[in-house]
Image: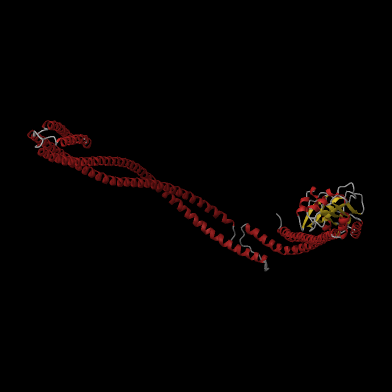
């Protein structure tokens, strides 16, 4: 077992060492960050100076270019072709500005005046990029990307400007070549710290100024960090080049789209922070030694008191509850000693109480075990009774379900009977409507018959003047007689059909149709009679007799129609009686339907209650079984409790409390 002295000493060591290490680590990192920030600010300031220098070079070049373009010498050359004064002008500009490599003017015909004087007759200067660039920007100043001069091989850029004559026609292009090697020498000569240096790139990453001449016109994009360099502005980047870690500040210059870079080795930065690291290590070692000495003294003062308490507690663990400690210090160890003494006193009192309680528990457990056995026997009897009740409830629920199904079937039959009754009522109503329509037709027929009688009377009066045409009237009367006979026969058939009262409307409809046809023929005959009235003057007596005979026939026909009417009225009364009976039957069926629904609901309620009763009885049965099991478990637990109480009494004998 490890000593608490070692544990506390290790813990204190950790609490001393870890904060010191963390403090040292963050201090060194913060120092590196601050140093990097200061170096970056210094580099950015240097890059700003470089930016100003490049701007100055460009401005001087533009001034020189405009000086040539606006001079009278070039205008004189354009007019006269005399190149002496123009050559002197180019010489003066080139000699006064050492960064200018060449100054020249190329006319639109390709003739070139250049200083220093060189033979360029074999070169078509109008095809050169600087010439075309000047044409593309009109009268503004154009500049090319850096390139190697075809004559000297030096890196340079060309700034050019188109020249126009008095008529604004192109006369030629004036240009100057800026020597980038001198610019590169000037930039490369600047030292930043011990290992820092400048270099310049174009916007596509081509190096145009670098202390290492081998890097000239190298594409930085071939390196993994090259594209990142091109995307930065006023930012810092760390990268590895030729197995050396570099720390570089990047700035995009205002002129030519160039990018300036100040690079230095990270080892130089690490060298500046090594002194800080060494100082922090020394401070950490001193603080660690002092802290450990103080911790050792403090730990010893604590562990001595703890040893005394530990020995006393070992004896108390063996059952000696009459011992106490005598540490009087007022620190945590003294408080621990006092708490231990109070604990021993409490345990001694607790053991005494436990002995008394154990004896009581032993007696109570005996009583519980005995009572549990009696209750268990009673609960078993109750469970059997509940099972019988549950079985009866289940049977009742099944009977109620059967009654509910039968009642539902009865309801369906009642619904069917009610629908059939409604259908019969609809048919009887239709028959009644047809009978009433037939009665109206008979009324109309009676009216027509009365009109026929009146017409016959008029004919009788008229036949007194028809003596001369009695034969023709006789024929017409015969026709009328035949029609009357047929009408009489049809009326008889209508009476027979009406008496049968089967499908009353259909039979009478046929008769009514035939009566209509005969009426039409009678009308035609009457029309023929009216046409012959003028010719009838003789045989009045015979005609009168014939007319009277026809009149009697019409009266008989009227009587037959009246009889038919009475029969139809009887049919209508019978149909009304049948309708009333069917309506009464429907009312009774509706009452049965309403009572049927109540019966179905009541039976379903009884079934539901029976099912609930059966379910509740089963739940009660299950609860009874659970209670029986619980009581048996209680009895078993009481027996176990009795055993535990006896074991507890035996265990308490080891404690010395007196």
Where residue 261 sits, quadrant-wise, is bottom right
- Provide residue 426's location: percent of width, then percent of height: 26, 41
- Provide residue 451's location: percent of width, then percent of height: 15, 41
- Left or right relative to 487: residue 201: right
Judging depth in this view, the residue of 163 and 485 nearest the camera is 163
- Tell me which residue sits at (13%, 34%) in the image: 535
Judging depth in this view, the residue of 349 and 414 nearest the camera is 414
- Left or right relative to 418: residue 559: left
Residue 185 seen by the camera: no
> Number of callouts in the render?
0
Judging depth in this view, the residue of 154 and 452 nearest the camera is 452
- Left or right relative to 328: residue 165: right
- Tell me which residue sits at (68%, 62%) in the image: 306
Residue farthest toward the left in the current orientation of the protein: 541
Judging depth in this view, the residue of 382 and 516 nearest the camera is 516
- Provide residue 601's location: percent of width, then percent of height: 32, 47
Which quarter of the rendered picture does the C terminus lie within?
A: bottom right
Residue 559 seen by the camera: yes
In the displayed structure, 189 sits above or below 635; it is below
The coloring applied to the image is: secondary structure
Which quarter of the rendered picture does the N terminus lie within?
A: bottom right
- Provide residue 326's location: percent of width, then percent of height: 66, 66
């Amino acid at each position: 077992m490890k000593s608490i002295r070692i544990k506390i000493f290790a813990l204190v060591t950790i609490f001393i060492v870890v904060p010191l290490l963390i403090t040292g680590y963050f201090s060194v990192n913060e120092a590196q960050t601050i140093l990097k920030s200061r170096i970056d600010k210094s580099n950015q300031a240097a890059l700003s100076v470089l930016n100003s220098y490049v701007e100055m070079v460009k401005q001087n070049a533009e001034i020189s270019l405009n000086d040539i373009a606006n001079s009278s010498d070039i205008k004189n050359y354009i007019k006269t072709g005399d190149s002496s004064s123009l050559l002197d002008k180019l010489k003066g500009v080139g000699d006064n500005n050492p960064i200018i490599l060449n100054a020249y003017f190329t006319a639109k015909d390709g003739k070139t005046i250049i200083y220093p004087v060189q033979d360029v007759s074999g070169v078509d200067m109008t095809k050169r990029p600087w010439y075309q660039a000047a044409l593309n920007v009109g009268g503004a100043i154009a500049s090319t990307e850096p390139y190697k001069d075809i004559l000297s091989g030096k890196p340079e850029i060309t700034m050019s400007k188109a020249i126009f004559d008095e008529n604004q026609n192109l006369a030629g292009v004036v240009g100057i070549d800026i020597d980038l090697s001198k610019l590169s020498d000037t930039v490369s000569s600047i030292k930043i710290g011990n290992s820092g240096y400048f270099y310049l790139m174009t916007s596509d990453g081509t190096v145009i100024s670098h202390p290492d001449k081998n890097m000239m016109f190298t594409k930085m994009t071939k390196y993994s960090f090259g594209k990142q360099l091109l995307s930065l502005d006023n930012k810092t980047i760390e990268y590895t080049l030729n197995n050396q870690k570099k720390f570089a500040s990047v700035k995009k210059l205002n002129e030519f789209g160039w990018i300036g870079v100040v690079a230095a080795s990270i080892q130089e930065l690490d060298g500046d922070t090594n002194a800080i690291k060494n100082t922090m290590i020394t401070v950490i070692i001193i603080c660690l030694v002092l802290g450990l000495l103080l911790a050792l003294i403090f730990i010893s003062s604590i562990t001595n008191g703890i040893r005394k308490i530990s020995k006393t507690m070992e004896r108390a663990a063996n059952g000696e509850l009459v011992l106490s400690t005598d540490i009087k210090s007022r620190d945590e160890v003294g408080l621990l000693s006092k708490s231990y003494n109070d604990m021993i006193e409490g345990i001694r009192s607790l053991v005494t109480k436990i002995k008394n309680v154990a004896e009581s528990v032993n007696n109570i457990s005996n009583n519980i075990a005995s009572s549990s056995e009696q209750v268990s026997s009673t609960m078993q009897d109750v469970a059997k009774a509940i099972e019988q009740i549950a079985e009866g409830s289940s049977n009742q629920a099944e009977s109620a379900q059967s009654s509910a199904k039968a009642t539902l079937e009865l309801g369906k039959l009642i619904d069917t009977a009610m629908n059939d009754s409604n259908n019969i009522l609809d048919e009887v109503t239709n028959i009644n409507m047809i009978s009433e329509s037939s009665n109206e037709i008979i009324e109309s027929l009676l009216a027509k018959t009365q009109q026929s009688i009146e017409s016959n009377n008029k004919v009788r009066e008229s036949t007194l003047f028809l003596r001369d045409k009695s034969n023709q009237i006789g024929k017409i009367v015969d026709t009328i007689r035949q029609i009357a006979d047929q009408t009489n026969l049809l009326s008889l058939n209508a009476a027979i059909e009406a008496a049968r009262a089967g499908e009353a409307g259909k039979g009478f409809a046929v008769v009514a149709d035939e009566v209509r046809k005969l009426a039409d023929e009678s009308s035609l005959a009457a029309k023929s009679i009216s046409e012959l009235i003028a010719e009838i003057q003789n045989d009045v007596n015979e005609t009168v007799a014939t007319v009277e005979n026809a009149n009697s026939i019409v009266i008989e026909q009227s009587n037959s129609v009246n009889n038919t009417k009475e029969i139809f009225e009887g049919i209508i009364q019978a149909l009304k009686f049948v309708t009333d009976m069917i309506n009464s039957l429907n009312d009774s069926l509706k009452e049965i339907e309403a009572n049927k629904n109540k019966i179905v609901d009541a039976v379903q309620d009884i079934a539901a209650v029976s099912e609930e009763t059966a379910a509740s009885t089963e739940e009660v049965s299950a609860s009874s079984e659970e209670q029986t099991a619980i009581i048996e478990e209680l009895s078993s637990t009481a027996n176990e409790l009795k055993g535990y109480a006896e074991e507890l009494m035996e265990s308490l004998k080891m404690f010395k409390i007196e």
